[in-house]
Amino acid sequence: MIMEITLSVCKSTHMKQILMLFMFCSTAMTGAQNNKTVEPSQGGTLHSYFTALEKESVSTLTLKGKIDARDFAFMRDELPMLATLNLQLASITAYTGTSGTSPGEQRTYPANEIPAYAFYNPVLQTYKPSLETVTLPVTASSIGTQAFYFCWNLGPVNLPNNLKKIGDYAFYGCYALSSFSVLSSHTRFSTDANGILYNKNKDTLFLCPNAKTGTIALPATVRHIEQSAFENCYNLSAIALPTSLQSTGTYAFANCAGIAGNLQLPASLTSLGDGTFYGCYNLTGTISLPASLTSIGSFCFFESYSVQAFNVHASNSRFSSIDGMLYSKNADTLFICPPAKPGTIQLPSGLKLIGSHAFYGCSELTGTLSIPAATDYIGYYAFNGCNAIQAYEAAAGNNWFSAENGILLSKNRDRLLACPTSFAGIVTLPDGIVSIDPGAFSNCTSINGALVLPASLSWIGEYAFYNCPGLAGFEAHADNPWFSTIEGVLLNKAGDTLYICPWSMQGDYNLPSGIRHIGAAAFSGCTNISSFNSGPGLNSVDYAAFSGCANLQSVTLPATVNRIGNSAFYACSRLNRFSIAQAQPPLIGYYTFELANQPAAQLIVPTGSMQNYRSAPYWKNFATISEQTFNTHLGATPTNTLKIRSFHNNLHISGLTTGNALEIRTTDGRLLLRRDPSASELQLPFQAKGIFIVTNGQNSRKIVL
């Protein structure tokens, strides 16, 4: 019995030992996967200390040895879970080569510097949202440009005593950053109770942390506020500017919620940098400018849509205000009309120059806007967003501008500047016109019919026809050496670049053969297109090409596509199928598929290339990635070849099979039209409206007209 008891105790003890050993091993394994301490003896070798499993799982990393820019590139690009980084005892050594944080670029990275782009890849446009905590090396003397760019989960940062320099936009987009801290013995920087970063004597304010909340009163010592210092501080409720302030850097308060109500600028202020109060949506009153102010940068108050008036001190030698609008001292130049200004206006008779964006977003101006006789210059986008103006006119004695049917033109009618958004009907461009300004017809929702482009027209500005849903299409004069058209779509003369698809286009769009490039915003806002299928040879899709195509569900791109621009498919909210025959994923940016239903959409790629896309930035965000064999000529092997486009009471149908009748029926089966196609494409008149079923052999499509 005693032996049995002893044996039992021994077994029990042995089992406990095994269990404890198992728990220890499990803990050790977990620690190996999530926490790691490395002391490299040489810079550029950090990668060799990691297994494949550790690369994917390490979230806390402590470095004590020598590292250089190559190791930062490794941490940035190959440690996706890295959240806590302790570099306190690490030593950053110099490195010269192409394998640093600027991929492929031959450059020298100084010793003791957190390198430029340390946690932002400028080539792949990838960020480090996993990074939450960083402890900087005690020996660090500088932080490079955009080092922590859009590390939006990064928390408070303590700056070491040796730090002397912080590069441009080093902490830009760090929305969770709540404070900076430095020792009182620091010789270059200081902070206040709010965690705002200054130089030592607090006469220059460098940066307010984006996560800062509440009301802030700046010290009376501050004379200069650096670029982007308060940019994107969405959580501030108010900022009291110091009476000592003399100048601001570019975009110092852009998109800052704390600039609110009326704004009284300090009497000591002499200079406002470009975009200083850009997008200050809480500015809802009057902006008062002091006598001392001598310089206002471009876009200084741009997109601050609720500003009601400007009031310039009478003693100011450079600027003046008349009826709430901002002018030069002698009122010969109009800089800004406050966007919230209502009603009709009368411009000074001596006005010579109306600046770019001068009336941008002035949506409450009404009536007729008359250009004085003295005005000889009007900048681009001067009247963009003036959606309630009924007409433009030019004074009889003006030698530079004229108006026709309320549309503003140059005197010799070679430049079209602006069409009032109330214009209804068909637009006829004057013979001899050479250029159409950017945004000239934007938001002209009542124009209709096809727009004929004269032979003389050589340039159309961006967004010239944005939000013109009634515009049926474009027709280029046969002798125009710059433009051509196919079924209402605007192309360059060579026919290899697509510039504008009219918003009236609907249904399936099959890109005509020969087109190599789709221009910026070419299909932007075409909400009636349900699918896009590219022709063979397409090489590039430019910036915002399909942005806002809210009903676009299917996209097919060929193997020749090698460039897709940022925001190309932004806000394509119903996208459910994206097919691309290119085996190597084109480089795309963060916004390429932003708000484009990626979490629910299917990505179809060539057989054997799935892993390429699963590991490619932003492509891997598709919910489902599958493979299929692609037709080398057209892209995805079609399961339904029938493609239909509606244009100006006509249907263009492609993908037809000869020998099978083409039929169009109502949803209850009533036959409306029957044809026997002799070719794969057919265009026919069809004016009926409603929902119809189109069939050709085994292929069928439902269309909504």
Image (cartoon, grey):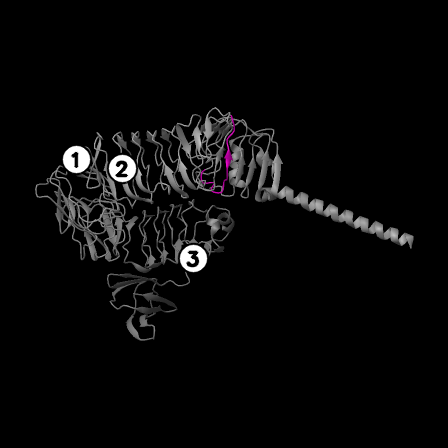
Q: CA distance from mark 3 to mark 1?
A: 56 Å
In the displayed structure, does residue 691 sit left or right of residue 636?
A: left
Task: Kindly check if marks 1 and 2 are in contact, taking CB atoms under 8 A apart as contact.
Answer: no
Towards the viewer: 442 or 51: 442
Please tell me the numbered disc located at residue 288.
2
Height in image: 384 above or below 637? above
In the displayed structure, does residue 539 sit left or right of residue 134?
A: left
Q: CA distance from mark 2 to mark 3?
A: 53 Å
x and y, in percent, of residue 500 in the image: 28, 51
Residue sitting at 17 percent across and 45 percent down?
345
x and y, in percent, of residue 267 in the image: 29, 31
The label nearer to you, 3 versus 1, is 1
Disc with the residue nearer the chain's start (1 vs 2): 2
The label nearer to you, 2 versus 3, is 2
Type of the residue with mark 2: Ser
Type of the residue with mark 3: Arg
Per the image, the residue denoted by label 1 is 332
Height in image: 536 above or below 330? below
Mark 2 residue crowding within 10 angstroms, few (<14) / some (14–19) / many (20+):
some
